[in-house]
Image (cartoon, rainbow, N blue to C red):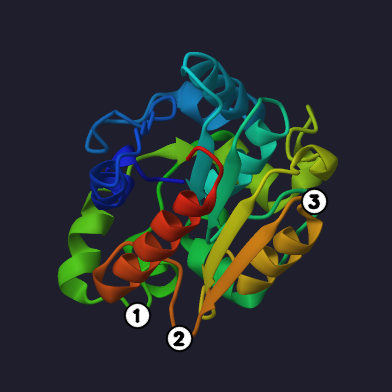
Amino acid sequence: MWSTPATFTRLRARLEADGHATYAPALPWHDRDASLPPPPELGLVTVEDYAQFLATEIARLPAPPVIIGHSMGGALAQIVAARVPHAGLVLLSTAPTAATPALGLSPLRTLGGVITRWGWWEQPTLLTEAGARWGIYNGVPDAVATPEIAALVWDSGRVLAEMTLPHLSKTGATKVDFNRLDRPALVIVGSEDRVTLASVSRATARKLTGPIDYHELPGVGHWLFWGETETRVGDWIAGWLGSLPQS
């Protein structure tokens, strides 16, 4: 949420060097310059809209992929994987689905600058710098966090509402049939994640019905894409992919 495929640039380079083909589509409106006024219709985009977009993108691929998602992308990865053939799942700091909700003070503090504005659930949203530094980039050096925050883009208030309060989804898109998620899965989260709490990843790992490899990084927050943390995450993903049949 609020991010672009650039999040995965270094990880993709690492995996491609190992011989894996990678593809990172931009969600609708996420390739738009955040300095421009957001289109009002973005605020009403739903989880189902994102899921259908991703399912269509996957249908164009030559073979069932391993689906990798971070944060909101982790929840979308589960939703989409329950609908399409896939070879496995990698869930990084995954957001909750309807079956794995987790409310707490730290997510509320992270999102406070968004959800305290009336009508946010039907408007385009952009995370505040204060919320981003406290809840997304906690533990990340300013030299890394500052350009990442500057690169954040507008996202959908409706999607944020459905992710936060799944019963608000009129389509039920946040409900996942975990019986269909029976492929191998790798789940990674930081113990100090303040927005998609580690308890969400633990609950998700328990719900998945295939072989699970679970890692919880002590002292690490939500943002996994920097420094030694990114290297460790890349090592785990590369090793796990190498263990899959015909990966």
Q: Count neighbours of disc 1 (C-alpha within 10 A) and say few if under 14, some if 14 to 19, many if 20 or more.
A: some
Which residue was labeled with disc 3? 209
Mark drawn on residue 222: none
Say left or right for 22 vs 188: left
- Of residue 190 and residue 11, the one placed in the foreground of this image is 11
Residue 191 percent across, percent down from the top left: 54, 80
Q: The residue under label 1 is which amino acid type? A: Gly
Residue 147, quarter of picture: bottom left
| Residue at figure coordinates x 39%, y 55% from the top left | 238
Residue 247 percent across, percent down from the top left: 47, 40
Helix, strand or loop at disc 3?
Answer: loop
Q: The residue under label 2 is which amino acid type? A: Gly
Disc nearer the start of the sequence (3/2): 3
Disc nearer the start of the sequence (3/1): 1
- Location of residue 48 with respect to 110 vertically, above or below: above
Residue 207, quarter of picture: bottom right
Which residue was labeled with disc 1? 139
The extreme front residue here reads: 246
Residue 194 seen by the camera = no
Residue 220 percent across, percent down from the top left: 43, 79
| Residue at figure coordinates x 61%, y 21% from the top left | 52
Disc nearer the start of the sequence (1/2): 1
Q: CA distance from mark 3 to mark 2?
A: 28 Å
Marks 1 and 2 close (CB-CB < 8 Å): yes
Q: CA distance from mark 1 to mark 2?
A: 8 Å
